[in-house]
Amino acid sequence: MDNISVTDHLKKQLHDFEVILKYLDQSGNLSLVKTLCDKYKKSKNLVHIFKILIDPSDLIEASAKLGNIILQDHNSAEQLFKQVIYKVISVLELLPQIISASQLAVIIRLSTLPVLSKMNTIQSVRCMSRLYNLGIFGHITGIVTGLSSVSKYTLYTRYTCTDGYCEGYQGNHFIRIHTPGASEAQTVRCDFTCTFCGSVLKEDKSNRTLSDRIVLEMIPENIMSKVHSNNYERSGGQAIPVIVRDDLTKIVEIGESYEIIGTVRKDLHDDKITLMLELKKEISTKKLLHELPRNVLRLYKDRKSSPWSFVLTLAYMFGSDTVTPGCYFSLKLYLLLSLMSQRTTKTKPLHILSISADTELVSRLMQFSLRFKDSSTSFLTGHSLTGQVTSDKYKSFNYFIEGGLLHLSQNGVCYVGNVDRLKNSTRLQLQSALSGGKIVTDIGPKYTGGLPQHLEQPLKGQVWGYIDDIYCKKKQVRDEEEFIPGSCADVPKSFLDSFSIICYTDCGDITSNDEVNYQILQSTLETTHPSSNVDLPVSTEDFIQFLKFAIHLKPRFTKEAETLIHSYYITCRKSRSTSDGTDVPVNADQTILSLALSHAKLAIRNEVTIYDAVAAIKLYEEYLTCRFGYSMLTTQFVPHLTSGLLEQCLGPQNDELMHQFHKNLLRYCSLASGLEE
């Protein structure tokens, strides 16, 4: 290379360094480097690691050349950034103890990945081979269906020359740092030679530093959406293995949806070639926010004068493709509130158990409602609720955990169907998960090499199920009876209490039930769809769009609403206590808070107001009344909205009743100080 070529090359390299330095400064990464250097001054680490977050789109605007290097040759890109960062640290003397560039490691993670005509989008296992041959980044959004145990790998280690008189015998000239895509055998080897004298290098094992890694299996969203929930196991062959390392191993959970960017690596296991994705991105959960549908907005404006009518009208129209409007009104309201519920510091997912004589219709209604949550599963015999542990298929870990139905429905609903048909062991697992609010997977001593262990994960999804009315005690109802209790003779109270709400769809007066049964029979006998004769302003598509919008609302509790709920809970526990205990579950307070928060979301409010609290308390009081047969607030459960009840439950008359209920509630709570626990 002549002098002119060398000069041009140095000028281009200097220009690249200037662009990188400017980008590091503008993106905030330079400040991060300085902060980490202050931290590393107090440590005695052999290698100092800097994780740089880069947006390729911004870098491409600054320099197309550097942008292409990032996307097509990430190892070379890391070396360029390493040179710049090392020079900054040396000039500014941020880490005076660094004596060689080999003690510096720069890891680049991408915040986004430009989509190149879907060339780098992973939609199935077949896409992995194409990406491996091209050597470019891959992008996948999917749901984690299983993960391995944590294993160790060599993050970095130190080598020295075996010749005591050689310059390479002392100092930190030979530092071996793991590079993305490299196996353990490629990182730690015994065939390295000294660059000073050519002698064989020897590893100084006292300076070997290990870090964590796991392998997770992920099914792309496009496949998950096409696979029916009952047959989700058939998609197991479409699972993409992803290697996750270091700090990211602590934030991965089975059943969660993640967006991942990485490079494809090839591993050989028992004469089988496995293509795996090596993570190169900060893991982020995918969230979507849709605009409010026009029809829903029109209905909202029409019912805005009432604090309760909009939510009740939505429940009235919900599921019109499955049942005629008004039928199973309370169950539909509970299902809508459950769909809105989430696990927070104050609230929990709302788990619904229905008790009905017409289990086929209840099952259809619940399965219809599953479509409003993307990650939903249905229980079939042979499926596991809490996951199962198997021998590691990748030959690098102690075991592999395959996610159960509760894991896979973490962002959706787990529909268990008729809980009375569940095996006793399965029912106990379900009760434990619902009561404790967590999914526990048992890992036997066969895999741990010692005492058994447990993997615990918070339960974030909802659970729905039903019980056939034939398993419940029958009670002869007289017309003069005001309260009609329901019960389950063969189901333990502890199991029933583990559900947030139990909906008795056959409670109520005989006339209403007869009218509803006639409507259902008439719809069944019609040749057309039962909803074809009903012109409702909000369609199923509108509901899908609206619920995806409402679930992302984050209303805050007002002090007034939270105080009223706590007062009701304390008063209710006291007034319903007997010598054998109390009818009100310990977690009822959290259930009512969840009902209020979900009601506020459906009402499109930024705050959980006193109106939401009153609605939640009334719903819970009706549930207790239906279950135990009496109410201090003279409420009566209304399972169906017949024609004669529309005005009373949806119109101005309902507002008057709710305001009166609020006054009675305040008087009821004022009695708490005079009652003993």
Image (cartoon, grey):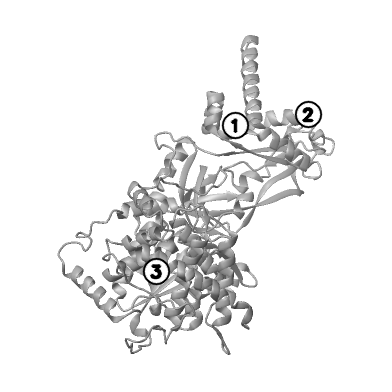
Q: Which image quadrant for residue 396?
A: bottom right
Q: Label 3 to label 2, Cα distance in Å?
A: 61 Å
Locate the N terminus by quadrant.
top right
Regarding mark 1 in the picture, which secondary structure is present there?
helix
Please give the name of the residue rendered at 36% of the width and 73% of the height, measured from the top-left corner: 638
Q: Label 2 to label 1, Cα distance in Å?
A: 23 Å
Label located before the other in sequence (3 or 2): 2
Dot 1: few (<14), some (14–19), or many (≥20) neighbours within 10 Å? some
Report which residue position mark 2 lands on.
Answer: 92
Residue 24 horizontal side relative to residue 527, left or right:
right
Regarding mark 3 in the picture, which secondary structure is present there?
loop
Q: Are marks 1 and 3 in contact (CB under 8 Å)?
A: no
Label located before the other in sequence (1 or 3): 1
Q: Are marks 3 and 2 in contact (CB under 8 Å)?
A: no
665, 519: nearer the viewer: 665
Where residue 36 sits: x, y (%)?
Answer: 73, 40
The amino acid type found where label 1 is placed reads Ala
The amino acid type found where label 2 is placed reads Leu
Residue 489 horizontal side relative to residue 47, left or right:
left
Looking at the image, is 669 positioned above or below residue 551? below
Label located before the other in sequence (2 or 1): 1
Dot 3: few (<14), some (14–19), or many (≥20) neighbours within 10 Å? many
The amino acid type found where label 3 is placed reads Phe
Q: Nearer the viewer, mark 2 or mark 1?
A: 2
Report which residue position mark 1 lands on.
Answer: 77
Where residue 346 sits: x, y (%)?
Answer: 58, 63
Report the residue that reaches farthest toward the left.
Answer: 527
Please give the name of the residue rendered at 67% of the width and 49% of the height, measured from the top-left corner: 154
Report which residue position mark 3 lands on.
Answer: 379
Q: Label 1 to label 3, Cα distance in Å?
A: 48 Å
Give the numbered dot on residue 598.
none
